[in-house]
Image (cartoon, rainbow, N blue to C red):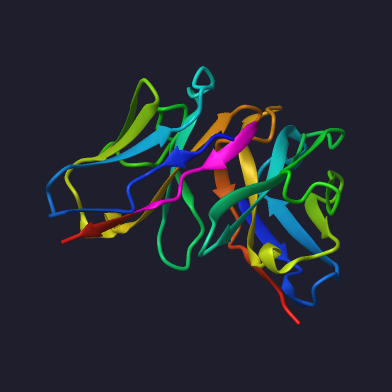
Amino acid sequence: QSALTQPASVSGSPGQSITISCTVTSSDVAGYNYVSWYQQHPGKAPKLMIFDVSNRPSGVSDRFSGSKSGNTASLTISGLQAEDEADYYCSSYISSTTVFGGGTKLTVL
Amino acid sequence: EVQLVESGGGLVQPGGSLRLSCAASGFTFSSYAMIWVRQTPGRGLEWVSGVSASGDTTYYADSVKGRFTISRDNSKNTLHLQMNSLRAEDTAIYYCTKELWQQHIPHGPFDHWGQGTLVTVSS
C-alpha cells in the first residue's frame, strides 16, 4: 500500500517563499512521475495547481512551481500572498491507483 | 466554461442506497474520463471510482468495490454513482471531477471539480 506523506502545516510571511514536500512511502517509485498538487480554500472544491510534477494549468500563477527529487515531490510558492492561505494536497498515480497526501495547511502570517 | 454540478446527496441509514448525479457542460463530455473523489475531515481526499470516456471501462477503490457502481450517459452529459450497502465510513462530500487529458485513464490529474454533494450515513 502506497502513501503520500505531507507536513501538516507550513507558514510564511507575505513576499516570502515556502516549500511543501510530498514523500511517497512505497517501493514502487518508478510510477512516481505523475504528481499533481491541488489547492483548497475552506468550503471550496480543490483546484489543480500543478500536474506531472512541474506543469502549470492555464491560468495558474507562475508563483507556483513543482519539482521532484527521488521519492519526494515539492510544491514551492514564491512571493506569498494572503490569498495563498489554503490547504494543499499532493496526489499521484502509483501501483495502479490514485492516492492523495494528507494535506498541508498553509498559513500566511 | 466547464461546469460540473452534483446532486443526489443526503442522509441515509446504514445499509441504504443513494444515487449521485453530475451534470456536465462546457466541454466534449464523451471525450474525457470522469471520476468521483470524496473528502472527509478524518481521511482527507480519497479517489472513489472512475469511468472511461466511452463508459465501457470502470474502476473502483477497494473500499467501495462491489457496493458502488459508476456509469455515464454521454447523450445527456451526465455521470452517476449508485451507492448501495452504505456504511458510516462512506459519509463524505462527494466531488465529480474531470480528467485533464482526453481519452486518458481516470486516475488524474483532475482539472475541474464540482462543488460537491454531502452524503451522510447515519441512523
Name the residue: 28% across, 36% down: A62
Q: In the image, residue B116 lies at what x, y percent?
A: 61, 63
Residue most extreme to the bottom: B123
- The magenta region covers A97-104
Q: In the image, residue A31 lies at what x, y percent?
A: 54, 21
Toward the viewer: A1 or B47? A1
* Vertical side of A60 occupied by B86: above or below: below
Name the residue: 32% across, 34% down: A74
Left or right of A81, for residue B41: right
Q: Quadrant of residue B59?
A: top right
The reply to whether residue A5 is in sight is yes
* Vertical side of B60 occupied by A34: above or below: above
Name the residue: 68% across, 35% down: B106
Location of the N terminus of chain A (image quadrant): top right
Location of the C terminus of chain A (image quadrant): bottom left
Left or right of B122, for residue A59: left
Secondary structure character of the magenta stretch overall: strand
Q: Quadrant of residue B89?
A: bottom right
* Vertical side of B105 occupied by A101: above or below: below
Residue most extreme to the top: A30
